[in-house]
Every structure is written in C-alpha cells, then in structure tokens.
Amino acid sequence: MKEEIANIEKNALEEIKNAKDANSLNEARVKYLGKKGELTTILRGMGTIAQEERPKIGEMVNRVRDNLEEKIVEAEKNIKNKELLEKLTKEKIDVTMPSKKQELGSIHPITKVIDEVKEIFIGLGYKIAEGPEIEFAEYNFDKLNTPAGHPARDIQDTMYITDDILLRSQTSTMQARVMENTKPPIKIICPGTVYRSDSVDATHSPVFHQIEGLVVDRHITMSDLKGTLKVFAQTYLGEDTKIRFRPHHFPFTEPSAEMDVSCFVCKGKGCNVCKGEGWIEILGCGMVHPNVLENCNINSKEYTGFAFGFGVERIAMAKHGIDDMRLLFENDVRFLKQF
C-alpha cells in the first residue's frame, strides 16, 4: 500500500510539473484529489486495511495530499504569471511609433458669419434678440402687416403645424415680439434658423439662417438706414465696398429696397462670383411700416424705424465664392476645413 501511495505521489508531481495551462493542471487535480481521484479512493478504502496499519497509511495519505495541494497552488500561480507575461508581451504598445493623426474641427462658415455680424452690430450698440423657431402665425404674419390671404401665407411656401402655428419663415417674428414688449428706443439684431417649403438645390434649402435688424426711435429716417448698412458693408467686406439701393416691396416696410454691394472679388469689374454684373445683392431693407408699429402698440406718429434682413448662407456664399449652398450642409471635411 505504501508503495502504491508513493507511486501516486510521484506520478502526480510529474503531471503537476508538466502542466502547461490551467486546464491541464485542473485535470491533474481531479485525477488524484477529486471525489473519484486515486488518492481519495485509498482514503475511502481505509476500512479494508489492517487496523494496526491504518494510522501509518492515513498519515502518509494526508501528507501526500497536503504536498500535492501545495504543489498545485504553486503551479497555478506560476501558470498565471506566465500567461500574464505572454499577454503583456503580445499586447505591448510601442510608444515610439507615430500616433494616428488627430483631425481637429473648426468653426463652421455659417456660425463664423453669424458671430462676425454680431460683433459688428454689438459694436454699434445693438442687442441680440433670439426666440422660438416654432411660432404663432400672429407674429410671423399678422403683426408684420401680412394679413390672411397674403401670398406669403401660402401653404406651399410655409411649413404649418396647425392653422395658427408654423415653423417661422423669418426672424422678423422677434422684431414683433420685442416691439410689443419694449418701449423705444429699440436697437436689435435677430439671428436664427428659419424654414420655407423649398426644394433643395444650389441656391435653396428648406432650412437656412437669417439675421434681421431693427431700430425704432424718434426721428429715424432712411438716411440712418443707409448709413448703418454702409458701415456694416465696409466693415465686413472691406473699406472700399460700395453700396446701392434698388426699390422693392416688402409688406412690413415702406418704402422698401434691396441693397447690393460692389463685388469684393473683382471690385465691380465683373467676374464669376457676381455673374459679370459687378454687384452682389445681399439684403432687403426699408422703413418700418406704420401698421407694424401700431400692431405692436407703438405710436407711429411719434416713432419711426428701419429694418433689414439677409440670409446668412447668401453672405457666406458671396464672401467665399461658394456656388452651391448644399456644400454648407453636407459636412464634407475637405470643404469645411478651408474656413
């Protein structure tokens, strides 16, 4: 019996020593120390051994079992250390290798134009007025002298939610809101997103951006409007920029005009940007219609005002020579990184 136990110990120690991984080590443990293991079987058969031999055999089996358990724990630790070392060696990072290039973003040209225009008009004493993009028809149309039945209220041109609620088609809604709740003098610009029921093409989009301005005070005249816009144009586009006004019609201003600036690319000589005309149309403007003032509880006999508005995309396209509005929305980094 002692010889058998000695052979079990010898074989077990050899298998534990040669175990390459946790699975093979566990197989050795089960083979010798498991419920049906070779050493466990001897312990269960102690009843068949002569009584005087039992203590010696029992002591020997316990010693062998303790020795094997100690060797298994030691082997398990060595295997884990070996596996960790192999993993670290395999997955190590070479810190001397060049890293992947980090692509840094930049300010979008639309945001850039809005910020630049804000800075100019804040310098002229204007305040920024912002408001809801989902608006009541009352502020989008009625208070701006655009009554029911006016062509601008055509469902084909405007995105209605209900008969009385729509996505605003102009930031002029904030002009009405400010005039209704603020006593003159008023000097504001209203930047923001607006919506029209337009198909997407090189010059149209159902979602675009506007900046509108409003001044209301005593003794405001058309010359104040022209002087303000001249300062804006020359500050933003260059000191040699010339401006001209052409008669137009807007329901919320009277008289109304469209303003052109001399092409800052060809200096008025004619080029692809200005389509050979030497001039680029950038905004609409005019004196605030007396009806608009009265609709907003401002006495039109005591106060006058002027308003102007332009599309941010148009300014960006004109300044940077962009011929397709869709480039501003497609998020092509190759295009955007130019700005």
Image (tube, rainbow, N blue to C red):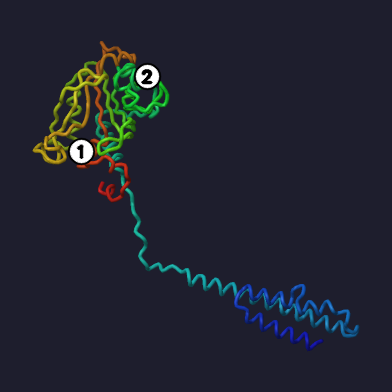
Pick out the residue farthest to the bottom: 3
Identify the element where label 2 is drawn: helix
Front-lying residue, 41 or 185:
41
| Residue depicted at x 84% and y 84% | 56
| Residue density around tag 2, few if under 14, some if 14–19, many if 20 or more, within 10 Å | some
Q: Quadrant of residue 206?
A: top left
Pick out the residue farthest to the left: 269
The CA span between labels 1 and 2 is 33 Å
Pick out the residue farthest to the right: 51
The residue labelled by disc 1 is: 318
* 191 left or right, relative to 232: right
Q: Assess whether mark 2 and mark 1 are in contact (beta carbons under 8 angstroms).
A: no
* 172 left or right, relative to 49: left
Q: Quadrant of residue 234?
A: top left
Residue 31 in the image, given as x and y percentages of width and height: 72, 77
Identify the element where label 1 is drawn: helix
Please name the amino acid that badge 2 sits on: Glu
The residue labelled by disc 2 is: 138
Residue 188 in the image, given as x and y percentages of width and height: 30, 26
